Amino acid sequence: MTMTRMDKTSLLAATLLASAIATTAHAATSAKPSPGDYYGTLQPMASDAVYFVMTDRFVNGDPSNDHRNQGKAKGAAFYTFDRPVPGAPAGKSDNVGYMGGDFKGIVDHLDYIKEMGFGALWITPIVDNPDEAFTGGEPVKWGGHFTDGGKTGYHGYWGDNFWVVDEHLPSRGLDFRGFTRAMHAHGMKVVLDIVCNHGSPAFTMPKDQPKYGKIYDKHWRLMADEQNLAPDKLDPKNNPLHAWYNTGGNLAQLSDMNENNPAVLDYFVGAYSQWIDQGADAFRIDTIGWMPHAYWHAFVDRIRQKRPGFFMFGEAFDYDASKIAEHTWTRNANVSVLDFPLRKALQATFEHSGGSYAALAEPLYLTNGPYANPYELMTFYDNHDMARMDASDNGFIDANNWLFTARGIPVIYYGSEMGFERGAAEHAGNRNYFGTKGIAEARKSPIRANLMRIAKVRQAHVALQRGLQVDLELAGDRAAFWRVYQHGGRNEIALVLLNKGDAPQDFHIGEMLQSGNWISAIDGSRHGIGAGQALTSRVPAHGVQVYTLAAEVSEPKLRSSLDAAMAGARKKQD
């Protein structure tokens, strides 16, 4: 599907945007700063690094909700549990059936997640998905893209009833509300993945299947049904069951929601508001780029009318910053986004030896960039829709040292803390089951050990979470930059030094260095720096050093650089 849907003039713009603009996260976090303020963002969510799990693939905590016989009565084409992808090379595997991961599997292993230094958990969609494998489309194959024949909704993105939790996820006494309570009791936020763009696969089936191409309300009344018809065969003017769908363009065989139908917006606002009421703390918006800005502006506006400041970030799978930045603007969705352009640079820098930190300078967009606020972007190096990073252990360690000290809110995909299935794409092992075996192996991984250290440093220092960034050096295997937070009586200056080389690197920092008693957040060492003196530090191979000073900024050159960074960080908007 092309991106023309973002450009079309829609009825939605005329009928839905008359609503008053709600108090938004950006209104709350982008207020005019006071003189002497230095910060990248005041967004509370920026305090928390995010661990991302595909719920079905994390841990099976309750086998009683596996539904291992689901669909079997109809034959081999329909069963839903454990469907290996054909064509796997020797020693490799992938699966497009359910594997048993559930809410209980997460709750039972929250300590594993939290002890790594994460404050939030992003989970895949929880809504009801069809109860059979999909019989249409091109048969799934090893490494295939958009090959969904024989696949199930284990991932959660094929919703048919967005008001109801899928039966594979809850346990007795642990519905979604119970899940969020357990998370909050452990001091963890819940980021819920949501979809408005599409429902389930809707056509090309040899025979129409239950729930596929259908949308139900909270009482299980049928609201929409594509009836196994191609989009151009739908008749929305004469068939009300077709009125919820578009008649041109679609992603694979997925039912394509009609953003111009006010009932569609009402449905999703109502359904997703329910999940907020049950404890969701933030939303990740799937396929945000496949629906026009007007729809998302209206959706976000209505969500925030009742929940001012509710944080959301969108997935626009595009490496062009000027395109994905549009979703962050106040007149559009007014949300954050996953930082795909930076991800591309991270891959180039850390996936293989020889990459240079210089590649990261431009996609940071620290000043005069296209984003409403680059400090609120979600930063990552791999996820479930792309090949996992194919790096050495040291490559992962170096990437994490960057991710948890540089601007943005870091996101780590489950298993990347041990290099799980490194290099594997979808239908080639990317989403494989992790389980207690994976957790046990990860506990022994040097990647995880180093991740825990730097994530906990970020967790303890507001400058790394929300501070402005001023670069000193980004070249070859070396990086040095300032992170500074000065707001509301809370002051912290951090100096970050990174070395991704195979030998130690000596750093001699005098530029913009403020006198005072500096403390290493890595090893606790103390360094008294007088006026005009420099700080010398040897950073080990594939290592990191972070020095902090709890003081207001007084060094003139640093203050001047921060003034420029503060003035240029946030895009001027109409």
Image: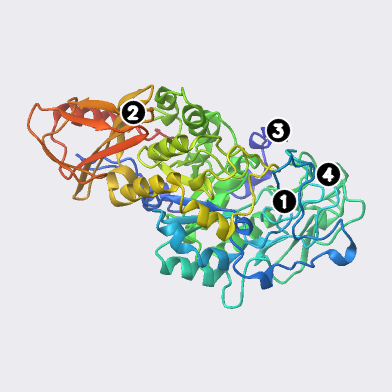
Q: Quadrant of residue 373?
A: top left
Q: Is residue 280 left or right of residue 212?
A: left
Placement of 176 over or under 204, stated as above or below: below
**Earlier-in-chain disc, 4 versus 1:** 1
Report how far apart the C-alphas of labels 2 and 3 lie in the structure.
39 Å
Mark whose residue sits in front, 2 or 3: 2
Q: Mark 4 belongs to which amino acid?
A: Pro
At which x and y percent is residue 207? 92, 55
Residue on which disc 4 sits: 139
Nearer-the-camera pick, 17 or 511: 511
Report how far apart the C-alphas of labels 1 and 3 lie in the structure.
29 Å
Mark whose residue sits in front, 4 or 1: 1
Report how far apart the C-alphas of labels 4 and 2 lie in the structure.
47 Å
**Residue occupying the point 37% across, 25% down:** 477
**Residue occupying the point 84% across, 64% down:** 72
Nearer-the-camera pick, 444 or 111: 444
Residue on which disc 1 sits: 95
Placement of 392 over or under 510, stated as above or below: below
At which x and y percent is residue 319? 56, 30
Q: Is residue 414 visible?
A: yes
Report how far apart the C-alphas of labels 2 and 1 lie in the structure.
40 Å
Residue on which disc 2 sits: 479
Secondary structure under tag 1 reads loop
